[in-house]
Amino acid sequence: MRTRDRHKTWRLEGTAGLEAAASVLGMVRSEMGSTARGAGRSGAQHAMAVNETVLAFVLGGRAPGAAGGVGTVRSWATEVEFLLPGGKRKVRPDGVWQAPEVGVPVLMVEVDRSTMAPADVAAKFPRYRELFRTKVRDNDPALADQEPADRTVHWWRRTWPGHTRPGYPPVALVVTDAGPVALANRQQAVTDLSADCWRGRWRREVRDYNDDGWREYDDAVPIVATTLELLATRGPLGPVWWRFGRSGRHSHKAHQELMDSLVCIDCGDVPEEESTWEYGPRGQVEWTRRPGGRCWPCHQDREDRLEREAEEQLEAARTANAALRPCWTCRGSIGGKEGSKLELREKARPDRLECPECVQARAAKDLGPLMLPVPTKRELVAALVSAPDDLWWEDRVLHAKLYPVRGRRV
């Protein structure tokens, strides 16, 4: 991966440098002279928008109580070109920002003055993904004995080694030079048109009973957007960033705290910064990783374990119920028909007389509780000599005491 040897980098240092930057960059575009306005048609206006973006990052928000700035102008590089594989096409962000002190090893920044079609703006992000995919040889001596394919590393990780989280570095889109509604619509349009870059790849896991899957973000570019006016008012650390694919605007700190809160309670895995790990059948979001929850592998392992335990419990209940007396009404298993929704998942109680289906049918017909036939005098006399060959004999005797013949419901 090569970059241009000649590129513009801010070199102002200290308080005096910041004041100088403020005096130069703080000049609003409407105050430029006729020559500058004429030149603006060929790029000067865009350069001033980039300068104002840098100034907003460095000085922070101007609103009362707004977050302060981060770093100095030396944290920025502009007019940097990155050659894509093949050496003919380039990626040239408007600015490259480094702020490891706040957990941002590198941020590519695109400034959009609302002069391009949203499709043209969205077309920039596939080139960033292609850039981030590029791998180079890793010269770490510890890898000297490994195969050549195992001695490669993403170019950007070697250039900015402070990026330790999984996934690609983020790209920021700063829009300006339009009304609030137009800027909001523009951001949404770019979001929709660039979905292939940031939405992640859907992976399916087909099973006998469902078509579940999950999204993988290892090849997705995390993209955040804001307006220049909001950035200058609230500062880069304020709640100004809208992450493509999510709702609301958040600060970097709030997003970081959210990611930290999503640590898996089973394995301790920390989620990738690109998403909250949303899953569901056929691409629909039906399960989302939440604070105090589990990562997808642990979620699946737990579901499989609970399913196995439920099956084992059901088989144990079937074996136990098969050894008990049958249902009084249908003469089937007291646990119910195998595979039915009402089948007992546990051993039936000793006083159970009917299977779940017959109990439900009796309740639907409002027949009241089941009362067994009263023992006859002949049966009572025979029981004095030998035990009756009747599985329900004891219950019949008990029912005769609990439910006298005269009080029984016909």
Image (tube, rainbow, N blue to C red):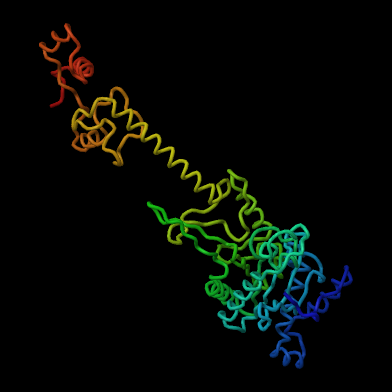
- In the image, is residue 212 above or below residue 182? above
**How many labels, in total?**
0
Q: At 30% across and 29% down in the image, what residue appears?
A: 321
Near-viewer residue (55 or 312) = 312
Where does residue 84 sit, x and y in percent of width and height? 67, 77
Identify the image quadrant of residue 144: bottom right
Given residues 133 and 142, the one toward you in this image is: 142
**Quarter holding the N terminus?**
bottom right
Q: Nearer the viewer, residue 277 or 53?
A: 277
Q: Quick check: 145 above or below 226?
A: above
The picture places residue 279, in percent across and down from the top left corner, at 49, 56
Residue 118 position (above or below residue 35): above
Residue 36 place in picture, x, y as percent: 76, 90
- Can you give x and y, in whole percent of width and height, for residue 63 in the image? 72, 66
Q: Residue at x 59, y 47 (%)?
A: 264
Choose between 326 and 276: the one closer to the eye: 326
Q: Residue at x 33, y 30 (%)?
A: 319
Quadrant including the C terminus:
top left
Q: Residue furthest top?
A: 385
Question: Does residue 397 appear left or right of residue 112 in this picture?
Answer: left
Relative height, residue 139 to residue 265 (above, below): below
Figure quadrant of residue 397 = top left
